């Protein structure tokens, strides 16, 4: 009646279950990653494992009332993370989706993932020219991500650089709050084009890169537009 949780059963230790019963008692024992009005993000340790927990705050009474009847952002992140895993797209492993409820009415929500550390794409690439090894590797990975998005008609919703961790092993997709499937072709193209424009904006300070990036984006957008 008071809460709803989905999680990996193998992790159900006493400490993990204690977190589910009272997450806020653990929350500020961890390391603050972000303290915003709508979300608070902490790194916490349970059973010698470090996790990232995002708490979705109810900013005011009216906002809380509107959220009662809608899937929470934690729910969306949980389902989107599993979708990305099914498509072999790297994202922090989903560990827990927890909603505080009053019966079927949703209140505050929490989303827990494995901790993935590394630089965002701008930090990873630095001032490297686009024909450098890191740029070519990262561009190939972005092309693959965009092609998967196009093939399965889902959009990210906020493709700023800080939402992508780039390492030598993978391009890791973060912040799945706005990710969703868009079944209609016209609607998908509108939102997909918006994602691509936001992705290109990450490098507006590097005009030397834009011709290649714009051509890459145009090729992918063209493929999306021609797909039934």
Image (cartoon, helix red, strand yellow):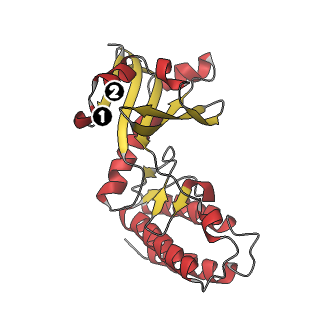
Label disc, if present, on residue 34 of the rendered structure: none
Residue 182 shows up from this direction: yes
The image quadrant of residue 12 is top left
On the image, numbered disc 1 is attached to which residue? 7
Q: Determine contact: label 1, label 2, CB under 8 Å.
A: yes
The answer to whether 181 is drawn above or below residue 40 in the figure is: below
* Residue 67 image offset from top left, x and y in percent: 50, 25
> Callout 1: 10 Å neighbours few (<14), some, many (20+)?
some
* Residue 87 image offset from top left, x and y in percent: 32, 61
* Residue at image location 44% in from the left, 49% down from the top: 180
On the image, numbered disc 2 is attached to which residue? 16
Q: CA distance from mark 1 to mark 2?
A: 10 Å
Q: Quadrant of the N terminus?
A: top left
The image quadrant of residue 118 is bottom right
Which residue is outermost to the front?
48
* Residue 70 image offset from top left, x and y in percent: 44, 30
* Residue at image location 27% in from the left, 27% down from the top: 13
> Callout 2: 10 Å neighbours few (<14), some, many (20+)?
some
Residue 71 shows up from this direction: no
């Amino acid at each position: 009646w008071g809460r709803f949780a989905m999680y990996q059963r193998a992790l159900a230790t006493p400490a993990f279950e204690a977190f589910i019963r009272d997450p806020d008692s653990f929350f500020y024992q961890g390391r603050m990653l972000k303290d915003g009005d709508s979300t608070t993000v902490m790194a916490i340790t349970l059973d010698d494992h470090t996790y990232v927990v995002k708490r979705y705050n109810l900013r005011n009474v009216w906002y809380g009332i509107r959220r009662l009847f809608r899937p929470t952002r934690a729910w969306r992140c949980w389902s989107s993370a599993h979708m990305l895993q099914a498509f072999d797209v790297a994202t922090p492993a989903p560990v827990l989706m927890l909603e505080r409820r009053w019966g079927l009415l949703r209140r505050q929500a929490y989303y827990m993932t494995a901790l993935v550390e590394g630089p965002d794409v701008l930090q990873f690439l630095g001032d490297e020219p686009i024909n450098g090894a890191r740029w070519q590797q990262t561009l190939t990975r972005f092309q693959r991500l965009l092609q998967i998005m196009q093939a399965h008609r889902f959009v990210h919703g906020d493709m700023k650089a800080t939402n992508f961790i780039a390492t030598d092993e993978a391009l890791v997709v973060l912040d799945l709050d706005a990710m969703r499937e868009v079944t209609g072709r016209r609607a998908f193209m509108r939102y997909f084009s918006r994602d691509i424009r936001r992705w290109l904006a990450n490098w507006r300070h590097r005009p030397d890169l834009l011709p290649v990036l714009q051509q890459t984006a145009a090729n992918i957008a063209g493929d999306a537009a021609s797909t039934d």
